[in-house]
Image (cartoon, rainbow, N blue to C red):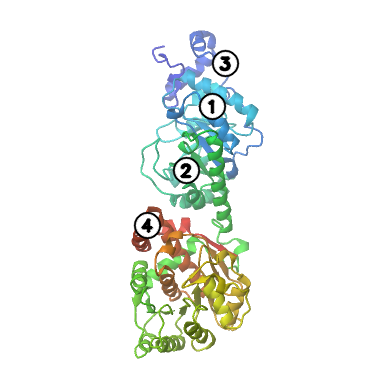
Amino acid sequence: SSHLADEGFEPVHARMSRALLRPWWTAIRARSRCPSLVRHVGLSFPSVEPGRAHEEPLPPGFARHDPASYRLYLVTDDRYADDNLEKQILDACAGGVSIVQLRFKHMATAEYVRRTQSLLAKMKISHPKVPVVVDDRADVCLASGAHGLHVGSGDLDPAMARRLIGAERLLGVSTYGQSELMREVVLGPAMADYVAGGGVYSSSTKTYTTKGPSHLHTFKAATMALEPQAGRRIPVVAIGGLEVDNVWPACYAGADGAACVAALLAPRGANSATEQARALLERITDATSAKQRAQKFLPVDDAALVGAHVLSGETLVVAVRSMRSAAPLVHCITNYVSMDVMANVLLAAGASPAMVHDAGEVSELASVCGALSINVGTISSGWAPGMHAAATAASKAGKPIVLDPVAAGALTFRTDVVRELLTDVGKMPTILRGNPSEVLACCRAVGIEVSDVSSKHQSGVDSSLDSLAIDRAAVDALARHLSGEGARAVAVVVTGRTDYITDGHEQRFLVCHDVPGLQQITAAGCSLSSLIGAFAATDANPARAAAHACCFYSLAAQLAQLGAVGPGSLRTALLDQLATIDDEVLAALARIETV
């Protein structure tokens, strides 16, 4: 009795030893010998064995091993345990919450049980398909009739938890992204129904070292590798500081769902829990759809991929490693404005720039450079001969040529130079990269009919035409024209909010990293063209090289934008990201879709 104190079932708190658990079950079976315990808590119990108390089936329609069942996971906290909590939970469920976890670390057991039973009764009426699980406390789970238990570090051992709650109830385990622990709780006696990869971002409810969203990619891949042996799907739930503005990367990286506390329960006005839940669910669903479009986590030997051109974060990792290892010399004939930025982008990425434009020198570089990048931004009659000579020499040497037709279609002289480079087989580019208006102007320059939009949307070197709205059929036709209908490998790249890369035949890719801040940095697009040259120097497939380069550059820019306060800090942060971005981040967050 000294162990019972004033906390009801505290002796069988999930952190207590097996020695304390055994007498409690004995007392439950022979409740007549411990009537004060029953009266104190205000409950009566049938004579049952561990794992059989208050057995309740899971809610109808809830599939315990379906990742979609854990899409939006609400977790409570002591700081929100006021009289309004129950209403907030019900409101959040109305907005799309699919599972609820009651977590109260400092609540008396009797009150914990009372609150759980009260919520279960209301959920059964208004949200009968949403299960309610309890954090850590096996006693509260069993006493209240909750649908399951969740345990983590310092809590009840997962195998013991499964023994106590039985096979019918849900058991979730926080594994903190540790693959070995995940393997143990999934394949071992615990038979965890789902696992949580924690510490994504900093949280107001716990203190830990943040892991970022990228670790979820490796973790999800590890769970999928175990699924054949486990004989079931293994849902992964992300947790840790997840909000509307940051949940997308976590779910795209690998998580099947997101566990949220403050995002759903922190005061935000009337009906905010419902609105927040809907906003979160929309972001999670969008990330899941994008993950499917990018064909993430498909096995490399999948029959559907045989002979197909499918790119992914993993192929990007290989491409970046290859480029950095070769450190190719990229011969850049570019405009005055972009020279500094372009050279630094190439150096940060792992390549080497050579800024040579005089006609008397350019031919010599063809034998030593890995690629040639031509940019007509500040073209003059003195520079044009150097461009022609360099293109001729690079073509003869079999080196890839990237052409950036800056403001083509806007001014006559540069348009004529671009037309000559596009029509002379001895100077023709391997890869053409431009904004939508520039690429459409190139279509016209070689006689491909397009709608009359180019002149309406060109403003200097910028384009107001959305890359998503461009006539892809015309772009594909341009690629086929440049390839001589397949005689040579080429690619056309249209960059913007989404980048479109095509060889005009079987290879068509979308790179989907939107970085609005790049519009405020001079020569951001010019620098990308030279970086495409670096990737093309180590990959004989122009479309694949261009897609990898676009993804590497725009992902680095997207990450840089997260901490930037303006264009100046974005430019600096971009260089830092290009130099330091690691394989795990590339594999987890790359967004390349096959069209």
At horizontal 36% and vertical 40% (from top left) the residue drawn is: 208
Q: Is residue 130 above or below residue 578?
A: above
Residue sitting at 51 percent across and 26 percent down?
Answer: 84
Residue 586 drawn above or below residue 66: below
Quarter holding residue 63:
top right
Q: Do the residues labelled 4 and 1 touch (CB within 8 Å)?
A: no
Q: From mark 4 to mark 1, how far is it between C-alphas?
A: 42 Å
- Quarter of the view holding residue 382: bottom left
Residue 190 visible in image: no
SS of the residue under disc 4: loop
Q: Which mark is residue 45?
A: 3
Q: Distance between the residues labelled 2 and 1?
A: 21 Å
Work out whether mark 3 precedes mark 2 in sequence or the reverse, and give the earlier one.
3
Residue bearing mark 4:
566
Q: Is mark 2 on a helix, strand or loop?
A: loop
Q: Are marks 3 and 1 in contact (CB under 8 Å)?
A: no
Mark 4 and mark 3 in contact? Answer it, CB < 8 Å.
Answer: no
104 to the left or right of 479: left
Quarter containing the N terminus = top left
Q: Residues within 10 Å of mark 1 (few under 14, many from 20)?
A: some
Nearest to viewer (mark 3 / mark 1):
1
